[in-house]
Image (cartoon, rainbow, N blue to C red):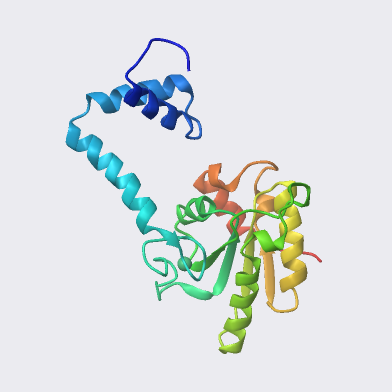
Amino acid sequence: MSGAPLPRSLERLIEALSRLPGVGPRTAERLAFHILRTPLADAQALAGAISTMREQTRPCEICGHVADEVRCRICTDDSRDASLLCVVEEPLDLIAIERTGAFRGRYHVLNGALSPMSGVGPGELRMRELFERVDAAAAAGSPIREVIIATNPSPEGDVTLLYLQERLGTKVASITSMARGLPFGADLQYADAVTILRSLEERRGVES
Ligand SMILES: [Zn+2]
């Protein structure tokens, strides 16, 4: 980084902040100087929150969402319909759907989408966990009646959608997709709640 010589510790913080998504070098400088001027206790609380979050969170053993415990707060909420499962690529997509307040089922986070071009196959995603979950629910006598595939409207999202349709079509009574309600290329996590709500309400069966 060029420019005015700064204390090494400050440079290190600027460098670390500039690696965050959407934060360029100038914004990183402004953030670092903002932190420099805040009371020491606030700066320590910020550093502590980052470190505690990293140490304490883990993927939920059932759905893969971020959790503080072995299971997340959605999977342990008995008021949520376990027979309705929404499959998303990332936790941020789940959060976008939760923002609508309209979905009362459970989730499954894949940790990405299939991308043969980039070498992302089923083994790189949480696919096996999904199939095992569907099988286990059926074996326990409380089968999943609908799987809503909420992958992004992108080539990777579509490949993932078709793969899931193929693999789950014989196991689940209804497989629906909400991707068609979103403009192609528009990531779910950036869509507004009204748009997500509409595509959720207008979700359609996936043709095989
Ligand atoms: Zn969970």
Question: In this rendering, is residue 37 above or below 166?
Answer: above
**Relative to 121, 69 lies left or right:** left
* Residue drawn at 56 percent across, 85 percent down: 142
Residue 96 visible in the displayed image: yes
Tell me where residue 143 appears, x and y as whole percent: 60, 82
Q: Residue at x 50, y 62 (%)?
A: 103
Q: Quadrant of residue 15?
A: top left
**Quarter that holds the C terminus:** bottom right
Q: Nearer the viewer, residue 28 or 175?
A: 28
Nearer to the camera, 32 or 94: 32
The residue shown at (31%, 22%) is 33
The residue located at (37%, 29%) in the rendering is: 13
| Left or right of residue 44, residue 62 in this image | right
Q: Residue furthest front?
A: 8
Q: How many marks?
A: 0
Residue 204 visible? The answer is: no
Q: Position of residue 116 (x, y in %)?
A: 77, 52
Residue most toward the top? 4
Residue 2 percent location from the top left of the image: 47, 13
Which is more toward the observer, 50 or 105?
Answer: 50
User: Does 191 appear above or below 23?
Assistant: below
In this rendering, would 114 be left or right of 148? right
Q: Is residue 160 above or below residue 168?
A: above
Query: At which x and y percent is residue 198?
Result: 58, 52
Residues 2 and 125: in front is 2
